[in-house]
Structure formats: structure tokens, C-alpha cells
Image: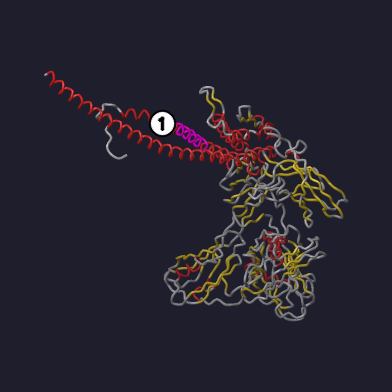
Amino acid sequence: MAGIWLPGLATGIDTKSIVAQLMVIEAQRLARYQVKKAGYEEQETVFTALRSKISTTRTAVRALSDADDLQIFTTTSSDTDVLTISGSSDANPGSHTIEINQLATSETWIQDTSTFSHETDYVGGGSFIYSYNHIERVITAVAGETTLEDFVGLINNDVDNPGVTANLLYQGDKYHLMLSGQETGEDYQISVNANTTEVWASSTEGGSFTKDGEVAGLTTKITELDEFNENSGLQGDEFITIGDPVSGKNHFGTELPDSTLDITANTTVAHLIDAINEHFDGVATARFENGEIYLTDHISGTSGLEISLDYNAGSGDTALTLPTMAFLTEGGTPESLALLGSSSFIETQDAQGSKIKMDGYPSSTAQELQTLTTDAAATSGSFTLSFRGATTGNLAHTATKQQIEDALNGLSTINAVGGVTVTVNDDFTAVSGADIDIEFLASAGDVEMISIDKGTLAGPTTFEITEDTKGNDGWLSRNRNSITDALTGITLNLHDVTTDPIKVTISRNKVAIISKIMSMINVYNELTSFLVEKTEYDDETEEMGILSTNLGVSFIKSQIRSPFFGLAPGFDDDTDTFLQASDIGLTVDHHGVMELDPNEFNDAVNEDFKAVINLLGAVALGSSDSDTIEFYAASEKYTTAGTYDVEVTIASNLITGARIKLSSEGESGWRNAEPDYSSDVVRGDSTFTSDGDPLYPENGLTLSVDTSVTNDTYTATVRVKQGVAGALEQVLDDALEAEGRLDVGVEFIENRISELKSRIEREEDRLEDVQERLILKFARLERTLTALQQQMSTVSALTQITFGALYG
């Protein structure tokens, strides 16, 4: 407002006070808006607090909503200095005795004879060849540039380093290169090689096996591979042959007997790799990496190794495109780094596995027996035998059993496992056409296969060494000192060998489960108390709660109680021990307060522990009352828990029709299900809404059907279970999800606050205009009054002059 306003200065009237009072009257509407806005802002604050409490409650409930997470165990060891133990949800209660015969160690090789006086000495130029776990690396040094410490860096910084650490050991005024394996166990052997080792691969470009266009893994099923064509499905007589059409051969080119792998719906890539390793037992090792099969010889140098794979569809019409195995690295390229030659290295620590007995098992031992068979007697020439990379001298075709035995026992690798005994059936010459039996000591356990190089032998055309008896040293062997696959769900951590058996116990931790339940009860009751306070009448203040008119919040208050009343979804008296929360002592009273009766809960746990945790946290568990239509699987995310009625019509061993309805929700109309004729399964309708939600409750439900029955329509009652904690979690998820009940309530409040802010701004602008008009109006009034006052003063003065002259 322009100018300076001095109200009442001339007239003495307090016009400022009058304007202020008039503005108070004018501002009543603004005050109403501000009161409403403050109320909505308070509701917004309450909604924020409510969201936090619901989120906290959901976290506590989530700890109970999956039965697998409730398999909580306490584990003990009678001697924790020797053995410690831990358990997962997959464990089973019980007690066991453990004996430890040997701890796993890693392998170390050291350069025994060294010429390096300083770390900065040059190593010369050339290649250094080493392998670890049958993965070979060639490290190249540059003459006049690569120092000993540089060379250590070349090994350690090699991006394809298979797991070896290089160090320098100073001893005897010399620096010695030391190679140490990073893993324990006999699978992780180091070797320093004079020549490269032969490697065959399924594809030199990689990616031989794929699933859905991506690189397949070991757990990928053969029938899931992109290379597999199912056509009319497996018939049960499909197989892969290893060694056909080209026979598998060892390092020396000796043919190995063909072996097969039966293909079923559950056969994986890992099964194929295991079958290849069984075929080349100790002669070569296969691994699967980035979709490729690699086969590495166990002996370095020029090799006659061969492998081929062939698929036989049997009586069916399936097809599997198997890769063509071919050279990746040909063996025989010699090392050329003289100052770090392979002959200068010695093994100072052998990689060995841990050895234990579990409850006295294995209770017996067995001596490994390998048999060499030829198809004819040798007439001239000589041959050699090899074991773990060591090879005998030439053995004449007339070699006696004693000569063969002496030659084998002369190998350091044979001595390391205790030696062998050789028997020839006719006790005459080694290769007279009779079988040669080679028997290891029982303490050797299951060892690799001896391989034969027929050399210059004349007469026999085939040589086979077979494993007639698998060795067993009476111990369970593992690569590591942390053993996870001896007892289901249990990890055994070995620290020392035992003199007496260690007793371990695994028991259910009921206290931990009760603790989780009490955590849920505490936050649940806090949430309930908060909801009551904010939605119900308060006798003390005689006012309704601030959210009493919000139907969404009232619905949440009602819904969080519902899982604890009535039968849990999918549970049935015929198949389940406990059907509702109160059966295990978990109740909610009419005030919404949750309680746990510890005695009743303890009795329930003692009666049927699994039934208790299922009632709390069953997730998509299912059952069927039919032998023809059986529950197979349900989606944790999409399948609605409850009881389904199912009908399937079968004709000529085919599913010709199927329909389903969720009877526990009162559905009366049937919907068609989706038969899968090739797999004999029926799936629920998998249609989704535009929002990505399942259109029908049976989405994700899969049922297996026995189509071998007679032509008829078969019925089943299928139950999909959901525990009470899972049902509560779902209610809380629905409340917290985007555009859920809380979001809708908050959005309404935010819109009202925004609207009121706009109204307040407009009202403030209007009041400012009104005030300015009033000020101007009173300013004009004052000017008018001032003029009148001045006129009156002039009239008074003239009157005094006039009458003063007349009467003066």
C-alpha cells in the first residue's frame, strides 16, 4: 500500500484498531481453512507413524511366515577344540558320533635347487608350465626383463590363475619359488610340467550348451537345454554313450570300454560330467565351464587322448545335439624356462582330503582291484603302465607277474598309497591272454585307474583296464575341513584328529521359535493399540480417534485379526494335526490383543513339531485326496491358498479336459485348466491383469495326472496351505503396497492439504486486498473529518470575530 498511514492522528479516532477488528471478522473463513489443514496434517503424521508400525510388524511376522525358517536347531559338540558344528533349517534332530582320522591339507611345491641370489635376478626367457586341479597355465618370461619377483607377480596376477599362490622362500642364501594351492583336498593337486598337457573341449568358441539362449549350468537338466528337442517326450530308454562312435582313449591311445548315461527328466549336465569322469577314472578329468566341456589329460606331453559323445533316442523321437569334442590344447610343447625347470621342483606338502567316520560308518574296508584284459597273447614287444602321472620302464611281453609288481611298486605314486599286489591267472607271462589283477591295499581307498601304453606289443588288439572292486579305506573323504554334505543341514568344522569319538547333538530350538512369536506378539499388540487409539471413541477425552472416519484404516484393523480366527487356508482335519492358531495356544481376544499360552504351545510342539511350524509358516504346501490327480507345485507369489475342486477327463491315456474352482471361497462356477499333454500335468489359468496381478486364484498351481487309468472323469479336492503368519504378512503387504489402503488414505489427505493450501493462499490474498481497501476507506474518512474539523474551526473563528465586533 502506497503512502504512510497515521490512523487517528488528526481525528483522534483509532481507525487501526477498527480495521484490525474488522479483519478478524473477515478472517474467520481463513481460520476454518487453517484448522482443517492442521487436522489433515495431523492425520498425515499419524499415517506416517501407522506405516512405520505396520512395517515393523511385518518384519517380525516375516520371521515366522516360512516354515523352512522355523526349522531352528541347537547344536553341541563334546569337544569343541577338535570339532565344532552348526545347523541350518534343513537339519534333523538327533545325536551322532564323529571320528576324525585326517585333516585336509593344501599342496605345496618348492624349487629345491635355485640359482637366484636376489629377488631382482632375471629368470631368463621362456615358458613355465604348471597345473592345478587339472587346469594348466603357461607363464611366459621375457629375457632381460622379467625378474624373479616379477615372475611371482605374473603367476599371482594372472586373470586365469586356477587357484595357486606364488611366493619366494629365502633359504641357504638363495630365493626359491614356492607354489601353494589355495584349496585343500586331494582334488587340488599341483604339478610343474616339462611339457604342455592335452586338453579337449566341446567348442573352441565356447557356449556349447545353452538354456533359453543363456549359458547352461551344471544344474541345468538335459531336457531343458536348447540343444534338446523333446518332440513327443522321453520314453525311458534314451541314453548318451561316452566313447562312441570313436572309442574313448587314454593318454597312450589305449581304448577304454564304452560307458553310457541314461537320460531321464531329472538328468542334469552335472550327471554328464560325472559320467565322463567315471569313464576316464583317474586318466583324465572333465569340467564344465561357461557352457563348455573340457577334458584334461592327467599326464603331460604328447597324448593319444580321445573322447566322443553320442545320443541315442531309444524307442522315442527326441533329439539332442551333442558337441563335437576336439583338441583345444595339444600336449607336448616343452617348457623353455631353464632356470625354473620342472625337474628343480619338489612336492613338500601333499594335498589330501579330510577323513571321518560317521556313527561308525564306513564299517568295513575294501581293496581296490583293477584288471587288465587283452584279447590275445602278446608275441613280441614291450609295454608300460602309468599311475598318477608316473610311468614304469618298458616291460617285455614275457614279463612275469613279479616283474610287473616290482615295476609298479617302484613308482613313487604307487608307494604313496601303500603298494600293489599283482596276480596273473595262469601265473606265467603278463600278456599271455590271461587277466592281470592289480590289487591295492585297503588303506589306499578308491584310487585312480592305472593306464597302459601298449607300446610295441604285437598280438593283442585291445587292452582294457577295468575297476572290478572300488577301494574303500574305511573313511569318508572330503576335500575340506568344513564338511557340509555328511549330515543334511549340518556343517562339521574339523580342527584336529580324534583319539576318542566326538559326540554331537542336534536338537530343535523351541526357545528361538517362542522368541520369534513373542516378538510378533509385542509389535502386533502395539499396532493394535495404536489402531484402536486412532479409530475408536476415547472415554476420557470423549472424542473419536483422528482416523475414525477412514474406512481403509478400519479395514486394516479388522483384517489383521482375521488370520487368527477360523481354519487356516488349505488346512483340513483329515490331514493336519492343527487347524487354527488357537490349537497351538496363539489367540487374539475381542480387544484385538494377541497372547500365547506357553504350556499349550509346548504341548503342541511335543505332539507334532512339523505341524506347528506348518500352521505358522506353511508356504504353498499342497495335498490332494486323489491318487489320479495329485498336487505337484504351487506358486508362493501367485497361487491363492485354499481348497480347490478339480475335475480331469482322461481318454486313451490323454487328458482331454480339465476344470477347477476355489470352493473354499464360495466359487460355484468352473474355469478351464490348462493341460500339458507331453508331461501329464494340469496347470491353473496363468492369465494376468494389466496391473500384473493373477486374474484367477489358481495361477501357478500345477497338478500331476496319472493318465494310465481307464477312460473317465476324475475328481479331486486339492488343498494349498498358507500358515497364519503368512496370511498376516499378506494382509500387511497389501496395506503397504503401492496404491494400497495406506497409500490411498495418504493420497486423499495430501490432496486435501494441497487443496486447502491453495484456498488459504487465495484467502490470504483476498484478506490483504480487503485490508488495503479498509485502510484506504478510513484514510479517506479521516481526510473528510479533518476537512470538516477545519471548516468548523474556521466557522467558529469567524463567529467569534463577528460577534466580538458587535458586542465588543
* Stretch in magenta: 31-47
Picture quadrant where residue 654 is located? bottom right
Estimate the x, y position of residue 631 in percent, counting from the top left: 76, 47
Looking at this view, is 238 or 80 the one in front? 238
Instruction: Tell me the chief SS of the magenta region.
Output: helix
What amino acid does circle 1 point to?
A: Glu
Looking at this view, is 755 or 655 the one in front? 755
Residue occupying image coordinates x 54% and y 39%? 748
Q: Is residue 694 above or below residue 174?
A: above
Looking at this view, is 671 or 599 the one in front? 671
- Is residue 712 found inside the magenta-colored segment of the image? no
Q: Is residue 300 above or below residue 580?
A: below
Estimate the x, y position of residue 25 in percent, counting from the top left: 40, 29
Badge 1 element = helix
Residue occupying image coordinates x 48% and y 71%? 114
Q: Quadrant of the N terminus?
A: top left
Estimate the x, y position of residue 384 in percent, counting from the top left: 68, 75
Instruction: Return the residue at label 1.
Output: 26
Q: Quadrant of the C terminus?
A: top left
Q: Callout 1: 10 Å neighbours few (<14), some, many (20+)? A: some
